Image (spheres, rainbow, N blue to C red):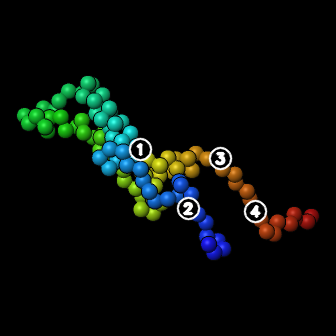
Amino acid sequence: MAYGENHKITYETDFKERWLWNFSARELLWIALGIFLGYLLFQVFPALPIDHVVFARAHLVLPLLVCLLCGYFQNPKTNLTLAKDLFVKVQLRQRQRAFYSFRPFPKKEEEK
């Protein structure tokens, strides 16, 4: 092994553990959350006034689609999932900021 080369640490490998239907545990949790929120919508909101059975309940799929977007799709620039990317951006916006006024040549006081 040459200088500067390291062994791959387990969490740095590109291997993703797949559990069920080629989904990881995190993706399955997002899918379960979407199905649960859709079920809660089913209990609260009535069917839309459309004659077709599938289109009358189409609004119940929206939480599942949002959860799939958050858990499955990645930002190509950062390689983070959408939920992690949004979480990091919110953390950056809420962090404590310090502002310094730096003047390389301070103003001289006026002489009387």
Kindly identify which numbered label has been placed on residue 96: 3
Residue at (7% x, 34% y) in the render: 51
Question: Where residue 26 is drawn, which disc sits there?
Answer: 1
Image height of 51 relative to 17, above or below? above
* Amino acid, disc 3: Gln
Q: Nearer the viewer, mark 3 or mark 4?
A: 3
Please tell me which of labels 2 and 3 falls first in the chain. Answer: 2
CA separation in Å, label 3 and label 4: 19 Å
- The numbered disc on residue 102 is 4
Name which quarter of the figure residue 8 lies in: bottom right
Name the secondary structure under disc 2. Answer: loop
Marks 1/4: CA distance? 46 Å
Mark 1 crowdedness (10 Å alpha carbons): few <14, some 14-19, many ≥20? few
For the C terminus, give its image quadrant: bottom right
Q: Amino acid at mark 2?
A: Lys
Q: Which residue is mark 2?
A: 8
Give the mark nearer the N terminus: 2 vs 4: 2
Residue type (three-letter) at the residue carrying disc 4: Phe
Check the image and report above or below for 1 versus 79.
below
Give me the residue at 79% from left, 68% from top: 104
Using the image as rendered, state which of residue 102 and residue 27 is in the foreground. Answer: 27
What is the quadrant of the N terminus in the image?
A: bottom right
Extreme left residue here?
Answer: 51
Mark 3: which secondary structure? loop
Looking at the image, which residue is at 13% across and 37% down? 54
Residue 34 percent across, percent down from the top left: 32, 38
Residues 28 and 11: in front is 11
Determine the residue located farthest toward the bottom in the rendered image. 2
